[in-house]
Image: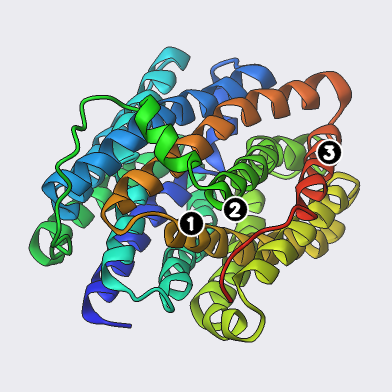
Amino acid sequence: MNAKLAILFLTIFIDLLGFGLIIPALPFYAESFGASFITIGLLSASYSLMHFLFSPLWGRLSDQIGRRPVMLIGLAGSALAFLMFGLAKTLPMLFAARILAGILSSATLPTAQAYIADSTTVEDRAKGMGLIGAAFGLGFIFGPAVGGILTKYGYGFPALVAAGMSGLNFIWAVWKLPETLTRKSDESHRRLLSADALKLIYSTPVLAILIGIFFVQVYAFSQMEATFALFSEHRLGLDAQHVGWILAEVGIISAIIQGALLGKLVRAFGEVKLARTGLVLMAVGLVTTGIVTTTLQMVMAVPLLAIGSALMNPTINSLISKAAPPDKQGLTMGTAQSLAALARVFGPPSGTALFQFFGPSAPYLVGGLLMASVSWIRMSGRR
C-alpha cells in the first residue's frame, strides 16, 4: 500500500468507525421517542435522500477544486451531525441530524473513490477500492460492538463519542491528507444530478448495466440494513449490545476478505465472476437470515451476507470506475453513489413496511429474490 492510500485508509476507517458506533443504537433510539417501524425506515431514508441529492455535487466539485478540500468538508460535517444526533431530545431533532449528515458526509465516499482512481493503475483499481471495503469492515468490527456497549450510558451517547472521533479525524486529515488531483475538469458543477451527468453515465451500455445491478443490490441490501436491529429485537429478543456483536462478526469477515484476499481473488477469477458470486451469496444469505429463529442460526447465516458483500461492492465499483472517462472519475463515482443513495431512499421505508405489514421475514425474502434476479445478467468487464 503506497503512502497516499495508507493515509486515506486511516482517514476513512476513523470516519466509518464513528458511523458504526451509532448503528446498533439508531432503531432503539428512535423507538424511545415513539417511532413506528415505518418511521424508523423514513429516518434512514432522510439521510439517503440527502446523499442522493448531494453526492454528485461533491463528486463534481472534487473534479474542479481537488479531492482534499471536499474530503475535509465531509469529515467536518460528520462531526457536526453526530453531535446534533447525540444531543437530540425529540424525533424531529433526530430527523434534522440525519438530514444534515446526509448533506455534508456524502462528500466523503465518492471523493475517496475518486482519490483511489487518481492513485492506482487500472490493474490495481479493484484492490484500491477494496481498501474502502476493508475500512468499512474494520469500522464495522469495532464500531457496532463498542457502540452497543456504550448504549448503557444512553442511546445518544455513541453519537457523542462518534462526534469527538470525527473532530479528531478532521484535524488528522488537515495535517496529513494530501491532494491527488492533477488534471482538473472545467465542467460546471452548479447542478446536482443533471441530465448531462445521467447522459454521461448511461451513454456507455456496460456502465448502465453495472450501475443498474448496483442499484438493485443496494436497494435489496438496504431493506435488510434498516430492519436488522428490529428483526433481532422482535424475533430473537436481542438488545443493542448483542446486535452490535453480530454486526462485528460481519465486519471481521469483510475486513479479512477485502483487506487481505481480494487482490488475489481478482487475479485468480476476475472482477466479473467475483461480482456475480457476491450477488448469489447475498441472495442466499438474505433468504437464510429471514428464516432464522435462534441467535445461533443468525450467527451462522450472516457470514453469507458478509462474504457476498465483501466480494460484490469493491468489484462493482472498480468496474464502474474503469468504464468512466479518466477526467470524469469524480462525477461518475459521485453519480453512481448518488443513485445508490436513491436506492437507500426507497429501501428502508419499503423494508420496514414489509416488516410491519407482512412480518419480520418479508424484507429478507423479497431482497433475496431481487438479488437472485440480477445475478444472471451478463456483466462485461476485465479480468
Residue 232 versus residue 143 in the image, above or below:
above
Badge 1 crowding class, 10 Å Cα cut-off, few under 14, some 14 to 19, many 20 or more, is many
| Any part of residue 269 in sight | yes
Residue 177 versus residue 371 in the image, above or below:
below
Element under disc 1: helix
- Look at mark 1 in the image and give the residue it sits on: 146
Q: Is residue 98 left or right of residue 209?
A: left
What x and y, as percent, mark residue 221?
Answer: 67, 44
- Residue at the image position 12 percent from the left and 46 percent from the top: 65
Mark earlier in primary sequence (2, 1): 1
Q: Amino acid at mark 1?
A: Val
CA gap, disc 1 and disc 3: 23 Å
Task: Locate the C terminus and report the quarter of the image it occupies.
Answer: bottom right
Which numbered disc covers residue 235? 3
Badge 3 crowding class, 10 Å Cα cut-off, few under 14, some 14 to 19, many 20 or more, is some
Element under disc 3: loop
What x and y, as percent, mark residue 27?
Answer: 59, 32
Residue at the extreme left of the image, as rendered: 175
- Look at mark 2 in the image and give the residue it sits on: 244
Render colour scheme: rainbow
Residue 152 versus residue 68 in the image, above or below:
above
The number of discs equals 3
Q: Amino acid at mark 3?
A: Arg
| Any part of residue 31 in sight | no
Mark earlier in primary sequence (3, 2): 3
Task: Locate the N terminus and report the quarter of the image it occupies.
Answer: bottom left
Q: Are marks 2 and 1 in contact (CB under 8 Å)?
A: yes
Image quarter of residue 356: top right
